[in-house]
Amino acid sequence: MSELKEGQAAPDFNAKDQDGNTVSLGQFTGKKVVLYFYPKDDTPGCTAEACDFRDNYQGLTAKGIVVLGVSVDDEKSHQKFVTKHSLPFTLLADTDKKIVEAYGVWGEKNMYGKKYMGTNRTTFIIDEEGKISHIIKKVDTKNSTAQVLELLT
């Protein structure tokens, strides 16, 4: 699949959240959506990013922004992550990798010289009409909310 670009329609999806509810991107038409992809529940960088969104969640929702996190972890893993860190937003389980592939964030990674396939941390900001307004590829996990808000002001 070709790389997504700003201005394109965001690929719609259906996925289960941490509570087993089906969530689709289409249900958020009329709202701005922060769709953030992260590699793994409860790892240091992913926890820092999730907790930054948590700590700034009220400010985001006050601006009408919906936060959705996506990883290839399952619902049970997401539920533990949400409970452990009191995350107030939805995490989507993409166990079949359909969403990460549709958004082009599943790819080869390299850690300590070992190559493997995984999710490349990326944040998409989707406007009220379902178009991608911004793509953040160099995510600052401790300041991810600030990165988002800087682009929206």
Image: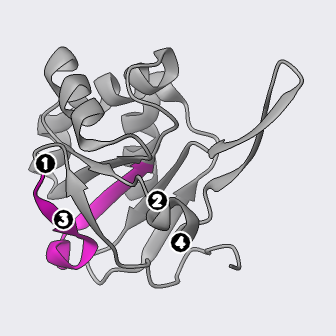
Q: How many marks?
A: 4
Query: Where does residue 104 sit, x and y in percent of width and height?
Result: 62, 65
Crowd class of label 4 (few under 14; some 14 to 19; many from 20; radius 10 Å): some
Instruction: Find out whether the residues at labels 4 and 2 contact each other: C-beta distance under 8 Å.
Output: no
Instruction: Determine which residue is flagged by label 2.
Output: 124
- Residue 115 is a magenta residue: no
- Foreground tag (1 vs 2): 2
Residue 14, quarter of picture: bottom left
Q: Is mark 2 on a helix, strand or loop?
A: strand
Instruction: Determine which residue is flagged by label 3.
Output: 23
Q: Decide which of tag 1 and tag 4 comes sooner along the chain.
A: 1
Crowd class of label 1 (few under 14; some 14 to 19; many from 20; radius 10 Å): few
- Residue 31 is a magenta residue: yes
Is residue 9 visible from the viewing direction of this image? yes
**Residue stretch in magenta:** 20-36
Instruction: Determine which residue is flagged by label 4.
Output: 102
